[in-house]
Image (cartoon, rainbow, N blue to C red):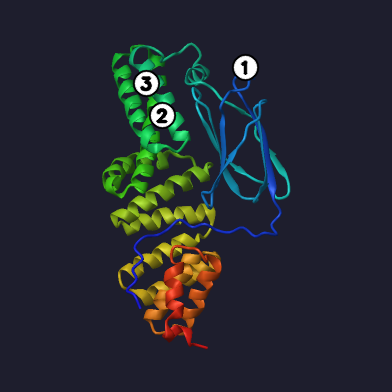
């Protein structure tokens, strides 16, 4: 048997029941004058799986998507030259939800929040341009390209603050500077997550900003709190700060209910520390929460095999293949099932 070591928690992708009744979403995207905006990007991200559907917008600016599992989704709408809109929506059971969206330019957002004020002068004007470019890449999830543009935005806005004398101008610039700083931290988290070579450096920069952002989120916005808590839990896990991990995972569980991946992550830590027997109850708890979480059966089988319970190991290896026949451990699992010590068990 090969010496197997599973070193990191993975993203959980749950499978919805085929018999579940579905819902739909539809709406229209226009500018503040009610006109259709060209090249609008509309997508839906299912919150519990991170799977994304890109929606087509017709010539009237309308979009529709049917056949949606009745769960929470992030509706993401963007267009070049406009401030994007991201909001959490709940698809109703066997019903529809309507979302008509008005996109605004950065200058319109500024004017709306403080009529007569404008930061479109000097360095702030360059900051606005950099911000608009950054938002486009950010909404497209191209965080690598968005990151330097948010850095430029912050630099321009800081220079603008040093030059500004008008009180309203100062306040508006500070507000947009805060948005740019928070957005940059999100980019640093996402780039660090996908590129281990930059992870420590970027997450060290992002953590204090994300912490401040989390502390500032009101409790009547639970999804925003849960999202930031998940970022901070992962950063804390990478640092080995178990107390912080428990804190943020507790907040997520309080908002969203028990999560299989939380129990699974605890099991992974115990497994990597060599405490296989202690990992088993956490894996069983994860399966109880989400019986279709394939990787849990795989790791549970490894722990059971190491503990000498070959019959239980065989059952869980077979369950893994049943759930994920083309998964990343499928070849390994089939090799284990062909081992005579397991294959011949009745």
Q: Secondary structure at mark 3?
A: helix
Residue pointed to by mark 2:
134
Nearest the eye: 322 or 183:
322
Per the image, the residue denoted by label 3 is 127
Q: State the residue in front, 326 or 190.
A: 326
Q: Nearer the viewer, mark 2 or mark 3?
A: 2
Camera-side residue of 314 and 135:
314
Q: Residue at 38% x, 43% y: name it.
A: 190
Disc marking residue 12: none
Q: Is residue 192 above or below residue 118?
A: below
Quadrant in which the N terminus is drawn: bottom left
Badge 2 element = helix
Distance from Cα at disc 3 to Cα at disc 1? 25 Å
Residue 47, image x and y in percent? 54, 48
- Dot placed on the residue nearer the N-terminal end, 1 or 2: 1
Residue 299 seen by the camera: no
Residue at the right extreme? 94
């Amino acid at each position: 048997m090969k010496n197997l070591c599973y070193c990191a928690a993975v993203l959980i992708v749950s499978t919805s029941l085929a018999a579940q009744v579905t819902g739909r979403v539809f709406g229209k995207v226009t500018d503040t004058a009610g006109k259709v905006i060209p090249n609008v990007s509309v997508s839906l991200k299912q919150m519990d799986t991170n799977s994304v559907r890109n929606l087509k917008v017709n010539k009237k600016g309308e979009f529709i998507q049917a056949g949606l599992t009745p769960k929470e989704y992030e509706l993401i709408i963007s267009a070049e030259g406009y401030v994007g809109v991201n909001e959490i929506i709940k698809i109703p059971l066997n019903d529809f939800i309507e979302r008509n969206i008005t996109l605004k330019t950065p200058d319109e957002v500024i004017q709306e929040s403080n009529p007569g004020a404008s930061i479109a002068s000097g360095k702030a004007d360059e900051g606005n341009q950099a911000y608009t470019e950054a938002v486009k890449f950010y909404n497209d999830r191209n965080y690598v390209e968005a990151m330097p543009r948010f850095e430029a935005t912050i630099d321009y806005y800081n220079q603008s603050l040093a030059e500004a004398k008008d009180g309203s101008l100062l306040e508006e610039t500070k507000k947009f500077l805060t948005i740019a700083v928070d957005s940059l931290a999100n980019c640093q988290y996402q780039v660090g997550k996908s590129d281990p070579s930059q992870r420590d450096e970027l997450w060290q920069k992002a953590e204090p900003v994300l912490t401040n952002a989390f502390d500032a989120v009101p409790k009547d916005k639970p999804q925003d709190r849960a999202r930031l808590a998940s970022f901070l839990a992962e950063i804390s896990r990478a640092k080995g700060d178990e107390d912080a991990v428990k804190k943020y995972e507790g907040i997520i569980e309080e908002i969203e209910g028990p999560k299989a991946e939380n129990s699974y992550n605890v099991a992974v830590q115990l497994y990597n520390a060599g405490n296989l027997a202690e990992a088993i109850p956490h894996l069983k708890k994860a399966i109880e929460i989400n019986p279709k979480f394939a990787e849990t059966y795989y790791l549970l089988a490894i722990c059971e095999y190491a503990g000498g319970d070959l019959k239980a190991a065989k059952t869980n290896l077979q369950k893994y293949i049943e759930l994920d026949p083309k998964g990343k451990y499928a070849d390994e699992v089939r090799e284990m099932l062909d081992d005579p010590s397991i294959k011949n068990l009745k």
